[in-house]
Structures are given as C-alpha cells and as structure tokens.
Amino acid sequence: MTDLYDRHRAVLPDWLALYYSRPLELTHGEGRHVWDAEGKRYLDFFGGILSTITAHALPEVTKAVAEQAARIIHSSTLYLNRPMVDLAERVAALSGIPDARVFFTTSGTEANDTALMLATAYRRSNQILAMRNSYHGRSFTAVGITGNRAWSPTSLSPLQTLYVHGGVRARGPYAALSDAEFTEACVADLRDVLGQARGGVAALIAEPVQGVGGFTSPPDGLYAAFREVLDEQGILWISDEVQTGLGRTGDHFWGWQAHAENGPPDILTFAKGIGNGMSIGGVVARAELMNCLDANSISTFGGSPVTMAAGLANLTYLLEHDLQGNARRVGGLLIERLRAICAQLPGVREVRGRGLMIGIELVRPGTDEPDLAAASAVLEAAREGGLLIGKGGGHDTSVLRVAPPLSLTVAEAEEGASILEQALGSV
C-alpha cells in the first residue's frame, strides 16, 4: 500500500483528498460490503460518496453493463441511442416536471453546470441565488455558487452569486426560532437580498438536504415558501438532487417533494445514485427551458450506452424492490439507535437526517465549537472496527456522514451502529 500511495503522491494533485492516515485501496465489493487490498472486509456506510445506492456488484447492473458492452460501448449523442431514450423516459416520468426533457451528463458537477447555463440563458442574467453552506460541484461555475469555503478554491466566477439563509436549521442567527418562525425569517431574508440585487435574477439553486455541508436541511416547506417569492419575479428554482434523489431520504423519491406545496422545481439535477457507481449525471427541465439554447450542443460521453444500460437496470431494481421504503424503515431504526448512543456523549451536538442520510455533528465537549480532530479520529476508529463512513460540514461544523446503500438490512444497521458506538466512545 505504501508503494501505491507513493505513486499516487508522485503523479496526482496534492489537493486530491484521501481518507485515513493509511489510505485505503478497495479492490472489490458485494452487497453492503467492500474489501481492501489486504483482504479486510468493511461494512460500507458511505457508498462511494452516496453513489452506490442499491448495492455493490448488483447482479442486475453488472449483467446489463456486460451485455451492452458486448454490443457497443460508445456512440455519442450524434446518433440515436435506445438505452438513453429508455432511461430518459423513466426519469422524466419520475421527475414530476411537466413536459419534461432530460439531458445526460457524466457527473453531478456537470449537471449543475448545465442547469446554470440553461437558467442564465433563459433569463438572460448571470445573477444566481445560492444557499449558505452549500456545495454544487468542482467546476469553475459550480465552485462560484458553492457556499462552503472548504470546497471553494477560488473567488473568481462568471456568475454573480447572492447567498441566502435557510439551508442550516440548527446553527446561525435563526437557530433559536420555531420552524414556522425560521421559515418566515428566511423568506424575509430572501426578499431583502432580492431588494439589493440589480434585478432579473436567473435562479435559486438549492440542495433539499445539504450533502457535503453535513446533511443539514431546513424545515419542510421552506423552498415552497421561497417559491412564492421567486415566482413574483419569474426567478427559476433549481433543485440539486445529486445526493437526495432516488429515495435516499426515505420519505420522498426526490428531496424537493418535502417542499412541494407550490409544485415541482423548474430544473432538477441528479447524479451519483442513478448509476450505482457508473458515471451518470443529468438535468431535467420543462421543454421551454431545456430548448432555450440557440447554439449547437452535444455530449461525447453523457448518455453512453453502457452507463445508460446500467442506470436503467439500477433504477428498475430500486423501484421494484422498494428501496425507498427500506430507507425509510431501516433508516428510521438506525437514526434512533444512533441518537440513543450519542445522547450521553458530550462531544455530540446533534444526530440529524432522514432515511439513510444521517449526520452526527461533533463539538468540543462543553462548547459549540466544531471538533475536526474528533471527526478524523472517529473515522479512523470506525475503519479499524470494519466500518467506512464519511465526514463533512461547513466552516463552523464537523460532521460524520452516514449513507449506506438503500438495501441495508436491519442486522447490518445494528452492526454498523455498534461499531460507531465503539468508535465514538474511544474518542
């Protein structure tokens, strides 16, 4: 492993983050488990940053990939592509957006980049509203709207970004308010921000549950309340479903459905789970929006026959086996178990989440200050115990991220909780 690590450091960027003091090489997986190069098995509670949403080495997906690869691997969007049309029809029907059109990309970053291009072209404005503590990808445009300084390597941007409150419920100036008061205050803040804008703002982009920011979310209905204000000026709503989509929250198939009183978003982006690890992202918008571009455009690798076949097989499996329902049931048990474990730990500020998207916020005992060292130590201890988790948070938080594949069993949830209990207790 040292040799591979040395080779990695010699040819790859220093800013390419690696987990663990002894970086881990994963060689294969099955179900909810993965194995490292030394043969050790781990229960995977992070799934390639929420990408392995059904299971590792899912037979239905691997079979679809192999069969499609044996026919043709690549053609580009310059040719008719049956798997792409098949998957686009399924996604359009599930999106909730009327007269929907779907454009496939290779990542969530690229999907959000495309959504921003559509919104700014349609509205003829480069002004974007974004949420504080947000993360939308690593492209130049996506970094320009990311409200999390740990993931913003430059202040330069082709967009003018205005940040509003609402993505973080339990911290910040409105934390002490009731849910109704919190929503009212955030709507007032939105109006105030718009009052300072030049006019003609293109869109609000928001994650229904902030992923990299530490699995934070506003009260249900906040974005519906925002929508009333946005509609007054024709401002579009982009829902970034890269991490919340495909039933991960258990309660809904899409995160936006927790804010559905005023209808679906104008634009929806997705990635990660749709391909179960294959490189798929995409954008859904009503035809009027999607067709607003007046120049040629294609995608060389977006909509690849192989990735589309994988996505279709994965989506079919997820729906037929009601993995959203499983996320709700098993996730509900897991979060209550974790809350019971953490209730007596002075270094845990909050256990939050829904479905199989759970955050454990760590602080220095007796304070409200984030404890980054503790988060790293728990990550290491969990690994030693045979469990892989993630971490994240904003500039003032340190959060363990728990997001297993949605096929997680009750026994595996209990096993993972027990390992986390030991890891947290050791720190």
Image (spheres, rainbow, N blue to C red):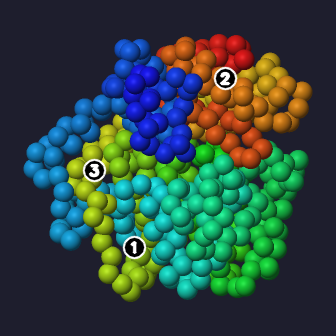
Q: Which residue is mark 3?
A: 307
- Asked whether residue 172 appears in the rendered view, the answer is yes
Q: Which residue is mark 1?
A: 99
Crowd band around label 3 with a 10 angstrom C-alpha radius: few (<14), some (14–19), many (20+): many
What distance separates the C-alpha of mark 1 from that of mark 3?
Answer: 24 Å
Residue 95, above or below 194:
above
Q: Quadrant of the C terminus?
A: top right
Q: Earlier in the sequence, mark 1 or mark 3?
A: 1
The residue located at (81%, 67%) in the rendering is 189
- Taking the image as shown, residue 220 lies to the left or right of residue 370, namely left
Question: Looking at the image, is mark 2 or mark 1 nearer the viewer?
Answer: 2
Q: Secondary structure at mark 3?
A: helix
Q: Earlier in the sequence, mark 3 or mark 2?
A: 3
Q: Amino acid at mark 2?
A: Ala
The residue located at (37%, 32%) in the rendering is 55
- Quadrant assignment, res 237: bottom right
Q: Secondary structure at mark 1?
A: loop
Q: Earlier in the sequence, mark 2 or mark 1?
A: 1
Q: Nearer the viewer, residue 177 or 173?
A: 173
The total of numbered circles placed on residues is: 3
Q: Position of residue 229 (x, y in %)?
A: 71, 74
**Picture disc at residue 377:** 2
Q: Secondary structure at mark 2?
A: helix
Q: Position of residue 31 (x, y in %)?
A: 36, 26
What distance separates the C-alpha of mark 3 from that of mark 2?
Answer: 37 Å
Q: Position of residue 333 (x, y in %)?
A: 59, 25
Q: Amino acid at mark 1?
A: Asp
- Asked whether residue 31 appears in the rendered view, the answer is no
